[in-house]
Amino acid sequence: MNEKEIFELFNKKKIIIAGPCAVESQEQILEIAKELKELGVDFLRGGCYKPRTNPNSFQGLEEKGLEYIIEAKRITNLPIVVELTSEKYLDKYIKDIDIIQVGARNMQNFELLKELGKTNKPILLKRGLCATYKEWKGAIEYILQGGNNKIILCERGIRTFETETRNTLDLQAVPIMKEKTKLPIIIDPSHSAGRKDIIQTMCKGAFAVGADGIIVEVHNNPSQSLCDKEQALSIGEFKNIMESLKNERYI
Ligand code: PEP
Ligand code: MN
């Protein structure tokens, strides 16, 4: 999908991005992609280079993962969103990745932002774990100054003193960042909650405050997920959420 078509989609409906935290095998990503396509998802997500807090955690399939998710895109025709953790891999992303994600941990990786600014690719810029709106706006400026204005923001929860959720979802970011930047903004209830039981409610909340879409983690076998399994929805659970949102998707 080209850049223009992607942004046109944002003018028509609330965008749904779904898929596993990480690409784990060709079979895994293809099975998930086929199910999600069937459910009417707009984009498939799947991390290949994973920015893990602990170096002993699964790091992603890297280049193989990219190959597998690109193949899943070819078979299902679902455009794909993949996180880029370093500008040194950028060449591998340009041709086939539809939206390049900058993860929370890289929101202030200024060299990465500068390189992305020189491209024409849509960028999904997640808010840093502890970033203020001003700092987030600074990251946006780095991309804009390179000449790339194809930016989609993502509020994914910020760190607070609360421990019952992984992060705290800041829905106030939606109206405030929309006003400040005029850019589309989506909500990631998976990384903010870090648990499954409140994802549907937070999706509803996201749409109620005017978010332009959501990005949600879904797995074909959540208990075996190699990454973020506590928050991974099964296909069935995600299907229920999709059904509950169907009247709210079209603008
Ligand atoms: C992700 O989307 O898989 C991810 C690592 O998210 P975040 O950067 O928001 O933690
Ligand atoms: Mn994840």
Image: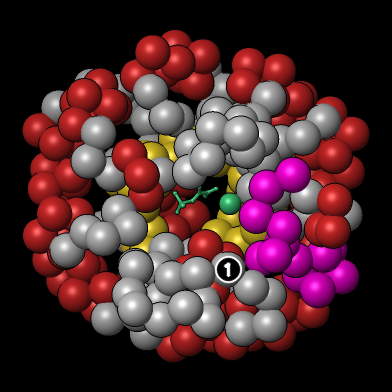
Above or below, 47 relative to 169: above
In magenta segment, residue 175: no
Q: Give the extent of the magenta segment.
A: 226-238
Amino acid type indicated by mark 1: Gly
Quick one: 101 or 157, which is closer to the camera?
A: 157
53 on left or right of 121: right
Q: State whether residue 3 appears in this view.
A: no
Quick one: 166 or 9, which is closer to the camera?
A: 166
In magenta segment, residue 232: yes
Quick one: 229 or 143, which is closer to the camera?
A: 229
Q: Position of residue 238 (x, y in %)?
A: 76, 70
Which quarter of the rendering shows the N terminus?
top right
Q: Which picture quadrant has residue 178?
A: bottom left
Label 1 secondary element: loop
Q: Position of residue 137 (x, y in %)?
A: 14, 54
Q: Position of residue 141 (x, y in %)?
A: 12, 43
Residue on which disc 1 sits? 194
Quick one: 88 or 67, which is closer to the camera?
A: 88
